[in-house]
Image (cartoon, helix red, strand yellow):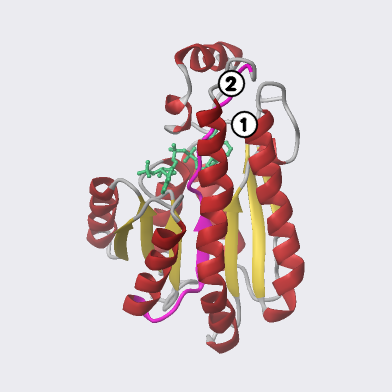
């Protein structure tokens, strides 16, 4: 059976959990060979096995993407083993919010390290391969989808640094879109509202409890709702470039 991403390779960061994991499954189901990247080797090994059992193809490569060398190495390893790279989904990220007077500086640094620097390292390493894939493949197109956030489009109190990282992702994605559109590399941001994943679990307890109370009556999105949007972006015909998708839970203001 022919599938939209047949014969393509997709690298998905944050594949051990939540949005990245759901996206990897979706892209594998569309025929892509998926490179699964996160720090937790055991999680991505299990996912690779599950994708294989469902008839797909996946390779698990563990890396801490806050290290430029590690990010560069996994892209080189993926292309060395699979011969190409057509799709990059940057989903790895952290959200650590709360009162700025009390927030440890370390939390701010960790968000900048992964949400901004990690994404830049992987994208920089992937770019030449994406340009090659767009020029040489039968589809004549390659894709980068960056998982930003509604916090990358609208500011909220107690989230200054998360806002800064996600506005940075949104801005860089649009600048790259303009830079690479004539080379058929599409860049898109997906900006979710509240999604039920492990993201909240890294927050300090008081912050977590505050958010749980604030959003108690909101039916949260599922990771697969976001994966479906990513799949819509990357499976479209060459002529269709989706630049931005905002997705909120219906009852989140
Ligand atoms: P999860 O916590 O479930 O997943 C985060 C992923 O990032 C994990 O796979 C984790 O893997 C990976 N990761 C974190 N740090 C690193 C690192 N240093 N190196 C490599 N991988 C890393 O959260 P979500 O799935 O919800 O988040 C995915 C993205 O979506 C994030 O960018 C988040 O900001 C964004 N988002 C999420 C929303 C939500 O409500 N959940 C809303 C809006 C945006 P591991 O720990 O194994 O390294």
Can you identify the residue that label 1 sits on? 249
Is there a contact, CB below 8 Å, between mark 2 and mark 1? yes
Please determine whether, in this image, residue 129 is positioned above or below residue 193.
below
- Asked if the magenta segment contains residue 50, the reply would be no
* Mark carried by residue 31: none
- Asked if the magenta segment contains residue 89, the reply would be yes
**Relative to the observer, which residue lies in front, 105 or 82?**
105
SS class, disc 2: loop
Can you identify the residue that label 2 sits on? 218
Residue 29 located left or right of residue 210 = left
Q: Position of residue 14 (x, y in %)?
A: 43, 48
Magenta part of the protein: which range? 82-99
Where does the C terminus fall, quadrant-wise? top right
Q: Position of residue 233 (x, y in %)?
A: 61, 61
* Residue found at the far front of this picture: 105
- Name which residue lies at 70% across and 61% down: 242
Name the main secondary structure of what is drawn in magenta. Answer: loop
- Name which residue lies at 48% across and 47% down: 92
Q: Position of residue 155 (x, y in %)?
A: 75, 31
């Amino acid at each position: 059976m022919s599938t939209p991403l047949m014969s393509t390779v997709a690298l998905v960061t944050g594949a051990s959990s939540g949005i990245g994991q759901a996206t990897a499954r979706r892209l594998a189901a569309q025929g892509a060979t998926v490179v699964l990247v996160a720090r937790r080797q055991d999680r991505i090994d299990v996912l690779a096995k599950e994708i294989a059992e469902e008839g797909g193809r996946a390779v698990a490569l563990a890396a801490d993407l806050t290290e430029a060398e590690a990010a560069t190495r996994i892209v080189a390893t993926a292309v060395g083993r699979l011969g190409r790279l057509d799709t990059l989904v940057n989903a790895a990220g952290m959200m650590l919010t709360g009162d700025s007077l009390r927030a440890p500086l370390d939390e701010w640094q960790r968000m900048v390290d992964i949400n901004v620097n990690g994404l830049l390292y992987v994208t920089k390493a992937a770019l030449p391969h994406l340009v090659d894939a767009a020029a040489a493949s039968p589809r004549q197109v390659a894709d980068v989808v960056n998982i930003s956030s509604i916090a990358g489009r609208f500011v909220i109190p107690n989230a200054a640094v998360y806002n800064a990282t996600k506005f940075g992702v949104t801005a860089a994605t649009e600048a790259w879109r303009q830079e690479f559109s004539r080379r058929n590399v599409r860049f898109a941001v997906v900006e979710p509202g509240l999604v039920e994943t492990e993201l909240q679990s890294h927050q300090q307890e008081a912050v977590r409890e505050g958010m749980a109370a604030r959003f108690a009556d909101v039916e949260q999105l599922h990771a697969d709702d976001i994966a479906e949007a990513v799949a819509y972006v990357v499976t479209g015909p060459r002529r269709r470039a989706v630049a931005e998708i905002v997705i909120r839970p219906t009852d989140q203001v």
